[in-house]
Image (cartoon, grey):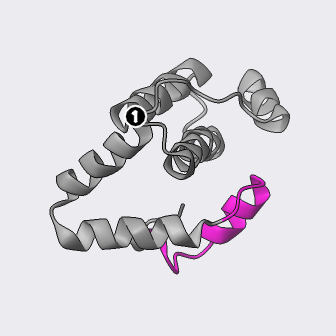
C-alpha cells in the first residue's frame, strides 16, 4: 500500500515492483478516506481493529507492509544495523498495527538479510 505522502515520490513504485509487490489502490483509497474522517490515531485504530478481526484485505496489506519495511531497511539502512534489529523493528511496527502472526520473507529478501 502506498501512503498519501509516498504518492509521486520518485522511485517508490520501482522499489515496490522490485520487491514483487503491487499497489493496492482500494486499500490506499480506504486509508485516505479514514484519515480525512478523523485523526491519524483514529484511522490507525480503525485499521488495527479490522486486522485483529481477521479482515483478509487489511491483514494481507499489513503483511506486505511488514515485508516492505524489512526490504526497505535491508536496502537503505547503514550496514552497521544488524538484520535482527531491522526484523525486531518491523515486528513492533506490525504488532502495533494489529498483526499477530508475521509472514515468511521471500527467499531473495531472506538471503539478503542473511548476508548483512
Extreme residue toward the top, this view: 84
Q: Relative to residue 66, is residue 15 depicted above or below?
A: below
Residue situated in front as seen by the camera: 19 or 99: 99
Name the outermost residue toward the left: 39
User: 115 or 101: nearer the eye?
Assistant: 101
Query: What percent of the width, then of the height, locates residue 47?
Result: 35, 49
For the C terminus, the quadrant is top right
In the image, residue 111 sits, relative to residue 37, either above or below, namely above
Residue displayed at 46% across by 32% down: 99
Decide whether residue 6 is among the magenta residues. Answer: yes
Q: Residue at x 75, y 63 (%)?
A: 17
Residue at the bottom extreme of this rendering:
8
How dense is the environment of label 1, judged by Cα within 10 Å: few (below 14), some, or many (20 and up)? some
Residue drawn at the location 52% of the way across and 42% of the way down: 59
Q: Position of residue 70 (x, y in %)?
A: 59, 38
- Using the rendered image of the protein, determine whether residue 6 is visible from the camera's viewpoint: yes
Q: Is 91 situated left or right of 57 in this image?
A: left
Is any part of residue 76 visible from this angle?
no
Percent of width and height locating residue 71: 65, 43
Residue shown at 38% from the left, 45% from the top: 50
Can you say whether 84 is above or below 102 in the image? above
Closest to the observer, 79 or 92: 92
Number of marks: 1
Residue 99: say if magenta. Answer: no
In-image side of 31 versus 40 (left or right): right
Locate the N terminus by quadrant: bottom right
Numbered disc 1: secondary structure: helix
Q: Is residue 107 above or below residue 24?
A: above
Q: Quadrant of residue 40?
A: bottom left
Q: Which residues are magenta?
A: 5-22
On the image, the x and y values in percent for residue 87 come to 55, 26
Q: Which residue is mark 1?
A: 52
Amino acid at each position: 500500500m502506498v501512503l498519501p505522502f509516498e504518492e509521486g515520490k520518485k522511485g517508490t513504485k520501482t522499489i515496490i515492483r522490485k520487491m514483487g509487490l503491487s499497489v493496492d489502490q482500494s486499500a490506499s483509497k480506504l486509508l485516505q478516506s479514514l484519515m480525512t474522517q478523523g485523526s491519524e490515531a483514529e484511522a490507525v485504530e480503525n485499521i488495527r481493529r479490522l486486522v485483529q478481526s481477521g479482515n483478509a484485505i487489511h491483514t494481507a496489506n499489513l503483511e506486505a507492509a511488514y515485508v516492505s519495511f524489512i526490504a526497505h531497511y535491508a536496502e537503505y539502512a547503514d550496514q552497521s544495523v544488524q538484520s535482527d534489529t531491522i526484523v525486531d523493528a518491523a515486528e513492533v511496527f506490525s504488532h502495533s498495527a494489529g498483526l499477530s502472526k508475521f509472514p515468511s520473507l521471500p527467499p531473495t529478501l531472506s538471503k539478503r538479510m542473511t548476508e548483512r
